Image: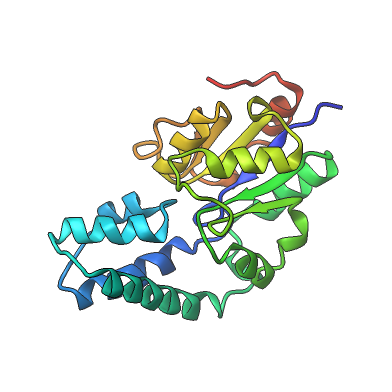
Amino acid sequence: MHKKGFIFDLDGVIVDTAKYHFLAWKKLAKTIGVDFSEAQNEQLKGVSRVSSLEKILEWGNKTLSDEDFTNLMSKKNEDYLSYIHKMNASEILPDVSKVLDFLINSKQGIALGSASKNATPILKKVHLLEKFEAIVDGNDVAKAKPDPEVFLIGAKLLGMNPEDCIVFEDSVAGVQAANTANMISIGIGEKSVLHEADFIFKDFTEMPQEFIEQIISGQINKQ
């Protein structure tokens, strides 16, 4: 049997925590007199907390002391955690569990590769933690996406070569990281946003099982 490594982003791929990030960042930005759009918010997806706040400050042409910067990041995380504390399995995105179960039954490697520093508690909340062989999150990496570090560590933990790995991502930065790592990049979301991905599906309900089978068998390769 062929074996591949499947690496999932968390926010916007497994669960829709992106909406909670947006609400928390929006609330924070308002306190420093910055407003930003949902279109701009796309640039924050898959990006570290530090880089996200730097972008917001840039959009508002604002500067902060190091102390205020650190305090704001902590406040944002507190707001975000207040949202995810209420999460449960109903927030798993459509057909994610079905795909995970198929990969497990097919004896494929499954890892999480997320910028989130809250990945483990979120997976516990939605009862998916035990389905992952390896978890790499914001606590484990020095470089944020689009740097491929998070995915390369994931591949190593799975015992796979990068070229035998497949990444599911909903962010531009994540797709770029997967491409840089020479992994098959599968965008989950809008084609207009994720056009750099090798393959794009609006969500997992649109991804045929045959497609995954062909990736495992090597009939489908990186574009």
Q: Is residue 122 above or below residue 37?
A: below
Taking the image as drawn, is residue 199 in sight? no
User: Residue at 63% of width from left, 73% of height from top?
Assistant: 88
How many numbered marks appear? Answer: 0
| Foreground residue among 180 and 38 | 180
| Foreground residue among 83 and 188 | 83
| Foreground residue among 174 and 144 | 144
Q: Position of residue 197 (x, y in %)?
A: 46, 31
Residue sitting farthest toward the front: 66
Q: Position of residue 9 (x, y in %)?
A: 56, 49
Q: Is residue 15 left or right of residue 24?
A: right
Res. 23 image quadrant: bottom left
Q: Is residue 223 left or right of residue 166?
A: left
| Foreground residue among 218 and 149 | 149
Res. 168 image quadrant: top right
Q: Is residue 52 above or below residue 35?
A: above
Taking the image as drawn, is residue 158 in sight? yes
